[in-house]
Image (tube, rainbow, N blue to C red):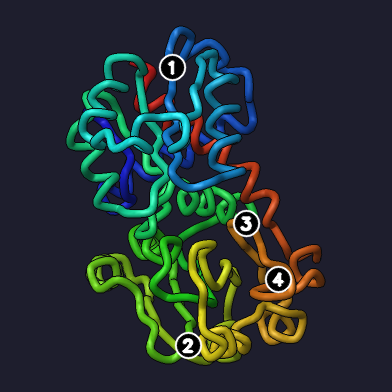
């Protein structure tokens, strides 16, 4: 049974197929308009969402299917029903499940107990739908992925970073993670990236200096410094101030460098309005491409 949990579960050929199909769907939105007629997608979200929820619901609708949104308050999970019982029940009603969760182990438990495809809509560990659609966006704007130099500024132990490490080196894209002292990515994700990079010629770098990191960057990427449920100390907040993507930092990057952010952005914190709204910013192209890439995922999993 197919499922979509992490980008390192896929070969480079499979990842390219997803991107190629998404690009085709973007060019011809009506091509698969009835492909999933009669299919139903459940979205079980324990974390709130705008882009992931709406893009999946819109994708399913445009492909001819339907969707059902479930949050903790509208399911028996809030009253103590086990994940295993919930997912086995949903498997009798719907054709696929998108899960947006805190703990990655809960996602794995869902996938192990489901008899339908499970799609990772985000966990604290990774965010594969976002990063694969970001690779699509980079390809659109640069015409390539191999040799692209991307820099991520912000928290290193971050779900976006882990999915970047799972995917960027497979395409031969270089990745620099620039974060405050004492922070590093998950060791398993970093090890996968380093092993893959040795085969593809990609470079995986960790650095503390934003100025050094962006000097040769094609892509400057950031994310919120703290998740909604975190309450950082003033000391930790101050540690991130040098990593803000502002006009001064972008001037230290090549003139053609593009700015990316998965959104929502805390403007004035990790990025300034001047950068987010600039001609170098492609943040809303990223948001749009979630729709097209997720169509490609749904068609792969459900168009049988």
Q: Residue furthest left?
A: 112
Query: Where on the picture, by quarter, is residue 248?
Result: bottom right
Q: Quadrant of the N terminus?
A: top left
Q: Secondary structure at mark 3?
A: loop
From the top left corner, tell me how far across and down residue 164 is, in percent.
41, 62
Tags 4 and 1 touching, CB below 8 Å = no
Q: Give the numbered dot on residue 256.
A: 4
Q: Secondary structure at mark 2?
A: loop
Tags 1 and 2 touching, CB below 8 Å = no
Using the image, determine if residue 129 lies above or below residue 294. Answer: below
From the top left corner, tell me how far across and down residue 162 is, in percent.
37, 64
Q: Secondary structure at mark 1?
A: strand
The mark nearer the N terminus, 4 or 3, is 4
Q: Work out how far the residue at label 1 is from the one at label 2, CA to CA, in angstroms.
A: 44 Å
Q: Give the numbered dot on residue 40.
A: 1
Q: Which residue is mark 2?
A: 180
Using the image, determine if residue 253 lies above or below residue 258. Answer: below
Residue 229 is left or right of residue 11, and the answer is right
Q: Secondary structure at mark 4?
A: loop
Q: Residue at x 40, y 29 (%)?
A: 75
Q: Which residue is mark 3?
A: 263
Local crowd size for mark 4, using a 10 Å CA cut-off: few (<14), some (14–19), many (≥20): few
Local crowd size for mark 3, using a 10 Å CA cut-off: few (<14), some (14–19), many (≥20): some
The mark nearer the N terminus, 3 or 2, is 2
Local crowd size for mark 1, using a 10 Å CA cut-off: few (<14), some (14–19), many (≥20): many
Tags 1 and 3 touching, CB below 8 Å = no
């Amino acid at each position: 049974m197919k499922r979509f949990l992490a980008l390192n579960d896929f070969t480079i050929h499979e990842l390219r197929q997803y991107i190629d199909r998404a690009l085709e769907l973007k060019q011809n939105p009506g091509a698969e308009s009835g492909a999933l007629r009669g299919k139903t997608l459940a979205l079980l979200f324990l974390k709130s969402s705008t882009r992931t929820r709406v893009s999946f619901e819109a994708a399913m609708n445009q492909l001819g299917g339907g969707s059902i949104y479930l949050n903790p308050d509208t399911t028996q999970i809030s009253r103590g029903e086990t994940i295993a019982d919930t997912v086995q029940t949903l498997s009798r009603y719907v054709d696929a499940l998108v899960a947006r969760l805190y703990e990655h182990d809960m996602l794995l438990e869902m996938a192990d107990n489901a008899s339908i495809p499970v799609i990772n809509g985000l966990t604290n560990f990774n965010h594969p739908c976002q990063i694969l659609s970001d690779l699509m966006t980079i390809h659109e704007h640069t015409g390539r992925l191999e040799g692209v130099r991307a820099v991520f500024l912000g928290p290193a132990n971050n779900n976006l970073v882990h999915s970047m490490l799972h995917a960027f080196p497979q395409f031969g894209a270089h990745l620099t993670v620039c974060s405050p002292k004492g922070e590093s990515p998950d060791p398993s994700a970093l090890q996968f990236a380093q092993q893959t990079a040795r085969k593809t010629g990609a470079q995986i770098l960790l650095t503390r200096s934003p100025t050094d990191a962006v000097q040769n960057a094609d892509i400057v990427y950031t994310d919120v410094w703290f998740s909604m449920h975190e309450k950082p100390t003033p000391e930790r907040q101050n540690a991130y101030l040098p990593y803000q993507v502002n006009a001064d930092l972008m001037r230290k990057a090549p003139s053609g460098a593009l700015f990316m952010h998965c959104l929502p952005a805390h403007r004035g914190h990790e990025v300034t309005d001047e950068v987010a709204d600039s001609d170098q910013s492609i943040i809303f192209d990223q948001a749009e491409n979630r729709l097209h890439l997720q169509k490609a995922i749904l068609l792969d999993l459900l168009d049988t």
